[in-house]
Structures are given as C-alpha cells and as structure tokens.
Amino acid sequence: MMYAKVIVDVAAARTDKAFDYLIPEELEEMVHPGMRVMVPFGPRSIQGFIWKVTDHTELSRVKPVKEVLDPTPVLTGEMLELGEWMAEETVCFLITAYQSMVPSAIRAKPKKIIRTNVEAAGLPEVLKPFFDGKDEAAWDDVVQTKEAASALKQMTGDGSMTVDYQLKDKTGKKMIRMVRIAGGNPEDEYSGTLGSKAVKQVQVMNWMSRHYGTKAVSVREVQDNLQVTFGVLQALIKKDFLLEESLESYRDPYENRIFTESQRPLLTNQQKEALEPVQNAMREQKYDPCLLHGVTGSGKTEVYLRAIEEVLKEEKEAIVLVPEISLTPQMVERFKARFGSEVAVLHSALSSGEKYDEWRKIHRGEVKVAVGARSAVFAPFRHLGLLIIDEEHEGSYKQEDHPRYHARQVALWRGRWHSCPVLMGSATPSLESYARASKNVYRLLEMPHRVNEAVMPEVEVMDMRKELKKGNRSAFSEQLLEKMQDRLEKKEQMVLFLNRRGYSTFVMCRSCGYTASCPHCEITLTYHHTGRQLKCHYCGYGEPLMQTCPDCHSEHIRFFGTGTQKVEEELTRLLPDAGIIRMDVDTTSRKGAHEKLLDSFRRGEADILLGTQMIAKGLDFPKITLVGVLAADTMLHLPDFRASERTFQLLTQVSGRAGRAELPGEVVVQTYTPEHYSIQHAKGHDYHSFAREEMAQRKRAGYPPYYYLTLITIAHEDAAKVMKTAARIADRLRKQLSPEAGVLGPTVSPIARIKDRYRYQCMIKYKNEPELIRILNDMNAEYQKEMAEENLTISIDMEPQMFM
Ligand code: ADP
Ligand code: ZN
Ligand code: ZN
C-alpha cells in the first residue's frame, strides 16, 4: 500500500500538518510529491499538495486520494523544502507558502488534456479507445484504470504524449484554431462528393487536399488564401469533412517588438573586477552571496548580463529580480536583446494566462533566464547557476501579505541549495546588506565610477525656509524656477519629483524646519485628527499639538504634504508654455498608461515630467538635464526608522537620472532641513559617509541591523477588543521572551482604522531569541478560535519593511 502525505488547502492551525491518504492502485505510478490532489476532507472534497509519498501510515483507517490534478509535479523537491523553511521563518501556514509558489491561473482545479504525438497505430492497445480518431483525450477518462494509467506514464515519459492544463479561455493558453481533412484518404476532387452547388466548400476541400493532405492548417490561413467565411468551414465540420482542432500558442507579450542584438561593450576594468569573483563561484559551484555596490551609471546591468552569459555557457539557469517599478520595457529589452527567446518575463501587468505561459516555459525548461519582480524568485528552475537581485535595497522585495517573505532571503536560500552565487546590486545598498558585507558575510564588490568617466551631476540644495522668509509660498524656489525657464528656452527636458504619501501627516515648522519626534524612538510623530494629538507609532508616546514652534516660536507650523495635481496647476500658471506630463497613481492606473506616458516624454512631446516615486527609476533619457526634488522632507519625516535611508536612496536615484549622456545634468533638492545628513551626503554622492552616520544612529536607537524587529498587528471591528487583545499579547510576550528582548506598545497603528477595523500594534526588538518563532506560533494557535470565529486578525511580520 502506498500513502500520500498531503498538505490540504485550509489555512488554519489545525490543518497545518500533513494528512495521510491512501493512493488507489491505479494512481500509484502517477503520484509524486509536489503534485496537487483532490482529497476528501470532512464532508467536502478539497485540494492539497502531496508533500511525501510513503509505504506506511500510523492511522488505522485512511481515505483514498480522489483525483490527481497535475500531470507532473508543480512543486519540485526544492520548492517543497523551501516552503517548509518559509512557513517557519515567516510564521505562515505551509499551504500558504506553497500556494504562493504556483501561478494563480492553475490554482483552481484545472482540466487536463492528453495530446498524442504518434499515429493511432502506434498507440498501446489500452489507450486506443480514448483517442478514437483524435489526437486528444481527457486525462480524467484515461487514468481510471491502472493499466491505462501505467501506459500513459510510459508514453509521457518518452515524449510520445504530452499532458497539459486546459484553462478557461480568458486566462488560459491562446489556442490557434485549426482544421484538417477527416479520415485517412483525401480526395483529389470534391465536387462529386459535396455536389457542385457548394462551390466554396468544394474550393476549400480541394485546396486543402492539394496543399496539406491530412495535415492540419490554421483556419486563419484557409480564410486568408481563399477569402471564405468561417461559416463555410463550419458547414464542412458539421458534415464531418473537416475536423476542428486547436494548437496551443504561447502568448508572447513582446511578440510585436523587435529586439536588435546589441553590441556587447568592452567591459571597464571595474566591471571586470566585479565580475571575476562571481564567475569563479559559478565555475566552482559555490554558494557565494555578493553585494555589488556600484554608483548609478557604473554599468551594473552589463555585469549582470555577462554573468548570465557564463551561466548559459555552463548550461545552467539564472533568475534576475528587478523591482516592479523598474521592470520597464527598456529594462526587459536589454535582456531580450542579449538572450532572445531564452528569457521569460514575469511581470504583474501580465494577465494571469500570460503569467502562466511564462511560468510553464520555465517549468518545462524551454527558457534559461527568468526576469521578474518579487515572485519570480520562485521560478521553478532545476539547475540554477546564478540569482541576481537588482536594487537589492528596495522595500518592495518584501511581500506585505501572507506569506511575508523577503525575496532576498529566498534568493539566498536557493543559492545555498544550488551552490551558486547570489549577486545583489545597488547604488545604495540596504544597511542590513552593507553591514553583512562589512563583516564578510557577503562579498563586497565596489564600482565607484561611472562608465566613460561621466561625472556625477551637480546637486544643489535649496533652503525653503529662506524662500518663506522672502515671502515665496509656492512649491518652487526662485532658483529652480529660473533653471526651469532656462531649460525651456534651450529645449531640454526636465523631471520634477514629488513624493507624496497621503497617509502620513506630520507637522513641520516652515520657518525653521522643526519636526516633532518621539523622545524615546527617534522617529517622527504622526498627527491624529481625533484628539489633535501627536503620537509615536512605535511606543505609543503622545503629546498635544502645539500652536507655535517650540524652537523658533513661529506660527508657520502646519501639516505637510502637497499633491501632484496641485503642483501641476501651479506649474501651468508659472510656466504657461511648458508641456507637462503628470505621472501618479491617477494617471497611470490603466494598463499600459505608464509606458505610454514615458514613450511620449521620450519622443520629446513634453518638456516636464512631473511625478511620484514611480518616475525615480529606470528612466534613461538623454535629453534630461535638470531634475528637481520639490519636497525632500515628505519622505525624511515618515514615521519609519528607515526614513533617512529611504530619503538618501531616493535622492541618489533621482540624481542618477541626470547627466547620463553628453549633456551635463543638474539636480535641485528643495528642503526645510538642508543640514540633514541624508541630504548632505546625497549631495556629495557619498554612500559610505551616509552609511557610517546612519549606522551610528541605528545603534543608538536600537534598530536593524543591530537589532531585529517583529511587528504584530491586531485588528478587529471593536476598538475595545483590539486594545484588550493587544495588551494581553504584549504582556504574554514580555513574560515569555528573554529579558534582553524589548516589547514596545501596544499602540495604535499608523493607519488606525482600515475598512472599519481598528488596528493596534506591538513591536518586538531583539538580538537573539531562539524561542521567538515557537512562542509566536503558540500564540497564533491559542488565538486560532477567536480568529476563525470572531474575525479577529493577528498578523505577524518578521523584519518588517513597512509600519502601517
Ligand atoms: P547602472 O545599472 O549601474 O546604473 P547601467 O548598467 O544602466 O548602469 O549602465 C549605464 C550606461 O552605460 C548604459 O547606457 C550602458 O549601456 C552603458 N555601459 C555599461 N557598461 C558599459 C561599457 N563597458 N562600455 C560602454 N558602455 C557601457
Ligand atoms: Zn520653528
Ligand atoms: Zn516612541
């Protein structure tokens, strides 16, 4: 007897273990770990992943597996293990981890179709009845008996048959409609059999017989050649003269683009030096995490491309992770131009069918390179030779929903599994990675110069406090406005950057730049309208809103935040002749809008590109000679301990946009706190000094990379219940964790209420808590009933990137 240990599709603590099911004899040969099955569960039938196959069970009575859903495992052995690790590390259910690794298009119960690639005569006897004159059969019909299933296994094993999912049209594979002449013997002339009146039908049959014999031809081709309607073909299908078939075609979202093989540039010396250790690790098949710190324009992408060339030479595969926001067509083109059809692209803008197609190319080993955002880290390759994470500092690599994994952690795990290098690149590495590189946990590779000795752009910092004193209350300093007028006259382009995040309301003195921050946590206090209070979102400290600035006694103390739309209106007033393209969530919500706006700007159809952070990356326009950051402070004062780091990263990114080509570039940063070290070191293009100062700050306040954080958010409709539960959880953690760990809160979350549910949070700060995961899992289990029955949510975020 064979048994399957199945992880069922019920995300609850009670079911977060494998259940045993009997494998019916006829399915024995088909069943492998990593396949999905339907199994009886209580009164219902549910889906699950086979985790292991064994020959014994502890149970006296096991129910049989009802159905096998996948012809081949959707999860490899590696993925099964990776899921276990993820479930543990991110405190999520195993089923949640596994579900996140397969494309959504096949998460439902898919229908499977068997296609035979051999003539009917070559089929084994047991299979013949299923294919009766066709080259397709339904999987479900065939696998009813052990004999048929076993024959099928043999046929698929040697490639005589293929099995695939038949998805619903909308998201499924794109099928090409085909017809072929029915029966084995096409006639030369059909006017006799069809009657001479059916002129068109006869024409079709004669043409097909002459040109194709019994081979299939696409309906489109018949119609194009003979100018007949589909109705004519339909009539022939009805009369059994023609058979209708379909041929799957991959939908290729890039099919209408032309990729030219780019000239491979000669590597610069610093590129060669960076590449060498990566190539060595690849050759020696050694796990080797490398942090590539290269300034903007130093040619990091070229290093990635060369490293991948090496991977392909070794017949291995590579994954390239890129933040969603910089996964632009230009970015993709650089990879497609070099590696052509070896590349699959996984992009959130693809339909779920398109995503599935790309996934399947990887799964079948038809491509060798996967380029994509966060979830591409699960690309089901079997022979990885390299993983690349571009812009490794990006917060978006952390998934903000279950499972809360960080793609960098997953990439490192896979690198270890495959014994291959992991290349993490950035102009502004995260302090976590930089600290690890400094301690030789990662290998540090530096590229401090731009390609072709291009100079870094000049960064000017404008003190907006002085503007206010001069009586200028607009969003533009006088100097910035002058520079803009100058560019307009010269017909050069400019980018204006405005970071706006609606949720955060902080209070700032426009006369002196003062902002209120927590005396205990060194983060900005957030204004709460109810109660007119300033609150700390880490520890709960609060104070009443001041009327005048405590530093300079000015009355110009107010909330901060300006919308892109408001700025656009002002811009139109100040520079009536300028062409403006505005890019923000409102103007780019429609699919493809983002790219259209950028294309239009590239063609020179506007002078000014005004936008939020979505324009900070991936733009490489030769005619941009001015970049303006309108309000650097909005990001500097987010209630997040990474606010300074994010500001530095952002200013470095946007200034990296200027002066990439022959024309020299200039950057203007407007701020009320020009002396802040984030702004000063960004001005000096000095990552190392910034990192030194920020590390000291983190050490003082007890933040990563010196401490680890865990954020626990509790939500429920009833505010009192949330408060009470949060307090109980904080107490419990204080008792259970070691005295070295700190438990902050509970306190109201930065977004205090979402969809009528109140939110409170606690934060754990720790250095070494080996029992933490177990304690959190126990807590989860204890609240399971309340969570299931009373709609209480307790979410646990290990090493959070966001503090909403
Ligand atoms: P980064 O990703 O570090 O900002 P890129 O890889 O985008 O830099 O390179 C910046 C520019 O320099 C690109 O236009 C790229 O084509 C070009 N480039 C990169 N390497 C070389 C090289 N070795 N020789 C000439 N041009 C190069
Ligand atoms: Zn002041
Ligand atoms: Zn505080």
Image (spheres, rainbow, N blue to C red):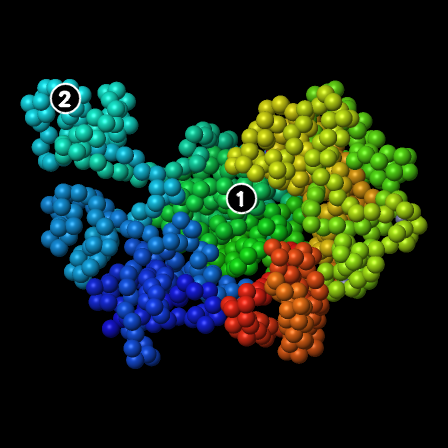
Q: Is residue 203 positioned above or below 471 on the image?
A: above
Looking at the image, residue 232 sits to the left or right of residue 11; the answer is left
Residue sitting farthest toward the left: 192
Numbered badge on residue 198: 2
For discs 2 and 1, the disc positioned in front in the rendered view: 2
**Residue 513 appearing in the image:** no
Q: What secondary structure is marked by label 1?
A: helix
**What type is the residue that disc 1 sits on?**
Tyr
The answer to whether one can see residue 42 in this image is yes
Left or right: where 768 falls relative to 417 = right
Occupied quadrant, residue 583: top right
Between marks 2 and 1, how big is the CA–CA gap? 62 Å
Looking at the image, which residue is at 11% across and 53% down?
125
Q: Quadrant of residue 494?
A: top right
- Quadrant occupied by the C terminus: bottom right
Q: In which quarter of the image is residue 171?
A: top left
Q: Does the residue tagged 1 have its C-beta within 8 Å of any atom of ligand 1?
A: yes
Q: Which mark is residue 304?
A: 1
Secondary structure beneath dot 2 equals loop
Percent x, y of residue 313: 42, 45
- Quadrant field for ligand 3: bottom right
| Lower sequence index among marks 2 and 1 | 2
Note whether 36 is above or below 620 in the view shown: below
Q: Residue at x 41, y 63 (%)?
A: 9
Disc 1 residue crowd, few under 14, some 14–19, many 20+, Cα 10 Å: many
Residue placed most toward the observer, 269 or 144: 144
- Percent x, y of residue 420: 48, 55
Image quarter (top left, top right, bottom left or bottom right) of the N terminus: bottom left
In the rendered image, the residue lying farthest to the right is 553
- Give the class, few, some or many, for how many residues have Cα within 10 Å of label 2's Cα (few <14, many ≥20): few
Q: Where is residue 761 in the image (x, y as percent from the top left)?
A: 66, 64
**Which residue is painted at 62% across and 23% down in the image?**
605
